[in-house]
Amino acid sequence: MFKNDYQGGSIVDIFSAQGKDPVAKWKLYGRKPSITKVFDKELKGFVYSLEGSGQTHKMQLPKDGKIALGLIQKFLILQVNVPLGKDFSSEFLVTDEEHLKRRLYLSTVHKELSATPLHARIPLTCLKRNTWCNLCIDLDSLTAEIFKGARFLSLDGIIISACCKVRRIFTMKNEPADCTDGDLELITGPKEEIPKNCQFPGEVQYIIQLVNTKTLGQTDLKGGTANSETVC
């Protein structure tokens, strides 16, 4: 879907809840009232709300599983809000440089990291509930470390499962500047500000979580307002 699009900028926009039909290119699972566009008073804008069971209520991009997204930027940002007492999961189909398809399954249900040669279950036990989050998935790090040296080539499929609210989804070429890896003195790789059109409104409280192989074992989570720094 994005293979022939320009991806040399700071971001590639994948989903925004604004507009007439934000899910036109997505496949929705579950009854319509459980996956719907709603106005969020805190954000003063529209979001997509997913309720119900994560097994049956989800949204998938692209609609046709045989089509590849072809997204090559290494950081995926999910702007999500997960309610108290509910579970949340997301699944990403990645292709490595050997053209093998591998799946990264992130979920609040999982308590520890486990993997087979083509499939990984990644815990999100530290995800803070009932607040907006820039959930930053380091696709390159996860692919390389979990699958023993495999190199990330492209992100080719996305599944977001209930329960959550989704504001925006996009990729970034570099790690967002607000993210840390748990050691402020150890900064590796270039960092870049999230463009203003993708940022939360200044008065909105939110957290930032970087998910890579360094942060998976950390449980310290600090909330904040705009410009706060938080790791998983």
Image (cartoon, rainbow, N blue to C red):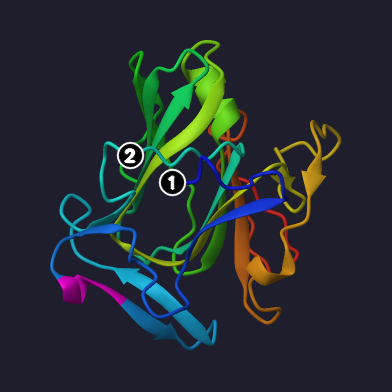
Q: Quadrant of residue 65?
A: top left
Circle 2 Cα neighbour tier, 10 Å, few/some/many (<14 / 14–19 / ≥20): few
Where is residue 150? Give x, y as percent.
52, 14
Circle 1 Cα neighbour tier, 10 Å, few/some/many (<14 / 14–19 / ≥20): few
What is the CA distance from the residue labelled 1 to the residue labelled 2? 7 Å
| 170 and 9: which is toward the camera | 9
**Count of residue discs:** 2
| Amino acid type, label 1 | Met
- Quickly name the residue at label 2: 67
Q: Residue at x 77, y 50 (%)?
A: 177
Vertical placement of residue 169 versus 49, above or below: above
| Amino acid type, label 2 | Ile
Left or right, residue 61 beside residue 182: left
Q: Which residues are magenta?
A: 32-36
The disc, 1 or 2, on the residue closer to the chain's N-terminal end is: 1
Secondary structure found at label 1: loop
Judged from this view, the residue extending furthest toward the front is 4
Secondary structure found at label 2: loop
Left or right, residue 196 beside residue 20: right
Vertical placement of residue 58 versus 109, above or below: below
Question: Does the image show residue 232?
Answer: no
Where is residue 135? Give x, y as percent.
54, 52
Disc 1 and disc 2 in contact, CB within 8 angstroms: yes
Q: Is residue 33 magenta?
A: yes
Q: Is residue 69 magenta?
A: no
- Quickly name the residue at label 1: 1
Question: Does the image show residue 120?
Answer: yes
Main SS class of the magenta portion in the image? helix
Left or right, residue 149 beside residue 6: left
Vertical placement of residue 28 versus 101, above or below: below
Where is residue 11? Give x, y as percent.
66, 52
Q: Residue at x 67, y 67 (%)?
A: 224
